[in-house]
Amino acid sequence: MALSQTEEKTLSDAWDYKGRPAERSKTGGWTSAAMILGISPSPSSPPSKPRLRPPNCTAGEHCVPASGLQLMVLYIALYLTALGTGGLKSSVSGFGSDQFDELDRKEKTQMANFFNWFFFFISIGSLMAVTVLVYIQDNLGRKWGYGICVSAIVGGLVVFLAGTRRYRFKKLVGSPLTQIAAVFVASWRKRHIELPSDSLLLFNDDGSTKEGETKKKKKQRLPHSKQFRFLDKAAIKDPDDMESGFTKVNQWYLSTLTDVEEVKMVIRMVPIWATTIMFWTVYAQMTTFSVSQATTMNRHIGNSFQIPAGSLTVFFVASILLTVPVYDRLIVPVTRKLLKNPQGLTPLQRIGVGLVLSILAMVAAALTELKRLRAARENGLTNDPTAEIPLSVFWLVPQFFLVGSGEAFAYIGQLDFFLRECPKGMKTMSTGMFLSTLSLGFFVSSLLVSIVHKITGDTRPWLSDNLNQGKLYNFYWLLAVLSVLNLGVYMVCAKWYVYKETRLAEEGIELEEAEPTCHA
């Protein structure tokens, strides 16, 4: 009886900081997750010493270009920032979700809320960056601004380390890429062997220890699926090996059916991954062309204060900060009753809402650009790219607000989807898949800009250096059309996708926190 109570209080798949089975009451939960929320990436400081940067120059002066040493220091700083941000972003959300036990109904609900507030606190950091830090740098100097960034990083690190005693650490499982590669290699090697008619004939090790092998923990068995049948060949026992009495299991020759099904789970997520890239292509416009639009418009509040063009993203971030609590407190209770889903909207539904809002944002951006060009023509400012058009910059707020609200839905939906649907032990890789959609979105944006320049550059360019002579609205319409087509493909993929929990329930299998197995 005492043993049963002890097992109920501890988690079989998590350790505490001393390597002991994690106790539910003393580790994890919101207390631990709140300390993880203190960690967020901040921009690194560019060189502040005079010899590490070119001298300042004003308009009309000959500007001294940066030297090789100065550029080298700058590039090293940028790449270190990218390296650190990549490692942090791909791990912190997964580590935060590890603090909640999916088998416990209360903690499972808390994990859904964690994704909301994780994104909320990231957005607060962004809001501080485009308001307080911009003001400090403009009025007190960059040294003060970047000094605050360093202090914030150190403070976040202290808070993070302070929670060490309460964190739950998942057991190491090796590289998921090794498992994926092994399944593909094994299936390719046996590509000429016919698949058995009965899936029960496929190899599925029960985790028992074989002679001469290290004892391994058993994975949760997954039901056989009929998709991607070519991968099933990785789990076929080679008749030649069976005849020769060869019994040693090598993952590069023979994979278990469970390993194969886990790889299939990753492949099933790829269509959703691909169709979310377009949202981040739209998102990229908020930091490029939308800011360029703002520089030509009336940014004054009163007679003295002028909003910096780069600070207009405050409306973008503010919409995120507004959307997250509104969704959590108002939309979730309503959708929970209507859809009979404890989470409110499912992750795929949230992504879909984000994609719809991105389309509306591009429509709003195109209409606003038409109005801006009309104001430029009416005031004879078409040939003057530096002139201030007598049109309030607040006309840009709708497109910032729509993309910001869309990000609140899409980002959290993607994060929830990729972490929940990935196989056990692949959370970090799955988070990396999600974050890659952000970077690819910006690459696609750059590619579209290059294509548009090449096609329209010889006539009247859509994306002219002088926005008053260009057709930026056509570029926004193009993005709107591409987003509509992408939404159609996404809806087909989302309809086709079956959630892991649903698929297991249909087979009569209860989702469990199985003991992880080393992939390598």
Image (spheres, rainbow, N blue to C red):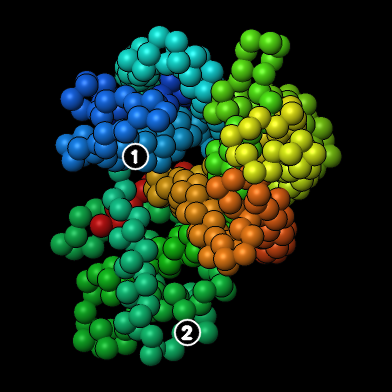
Query: Total of numbered circles in the picture?
Result: 2
The image shows residue 373 at horizontal and vertical percentages of 74, 43
Tell me what residue is drawn at x 58 percent, y 28 percent. Answer: 309
| C-alpha distance separating marks 1 and 2 | 48 Å
The image shows residue 158 at horizontal and vertical percentages of 32, 15
Q: Residues within 10 Å of mark 2 (few under 14, many from 20)?
A: few
Q: Determine whether the residue tagged by mark 1 lies in a helix, strand or loop.
A: helix
Instruction: Say which of marks 1 and 2 sits in front.
Output: 1
Image quadrant containing the C terminus: bottom left
Residue kind at label 2, given as amino acid type = Pro
User: In front: 434, or 212?
Assistant: 434
| Residue closest to the far right | 338
Q: Determine whether the residue tagged by mark 2 lies in a helix, strand or loop.
A: loop
| Mark carried by residue 82 | 1
Question: To which quarter of the image does residue 136 belong?
Answer: top left
In the displayed structure, 37 sits above or below 347; it is: above
In the displayed structure, 390 sits above or below 439; it is: above
User: In front: 436, or 374?
Assistant: 374
Residue, disc 2: 196
The image shows residue 72 at horizontal and vertical percentages of 20, 39
**Cβ–Cβ under 8 Å for marks 1 and 2:** no
Pointer 1 or 2: first along the chain: 1
Q: Residues within 10 Å of mark 1 (few under 14, many from 20)?
A: some
Residue kind at label 1, given as amino acid type = Ala
Tell me what residue is drawn at x 45 percent, y 75 percent. Answer: 232
Tell me what residue is drawn at x 71 percent, y 50 percent. Answer: 473
Image quadrant containing the N terminus: top left
In the displayed structure, 509 sits above or below 335; it is: below
Residue 498 visible (yes or no): no
Tell me what residue is drawn at x 26 percent, y 21 percent. Answer: 48
Residue 147 left/right relative to 274: left
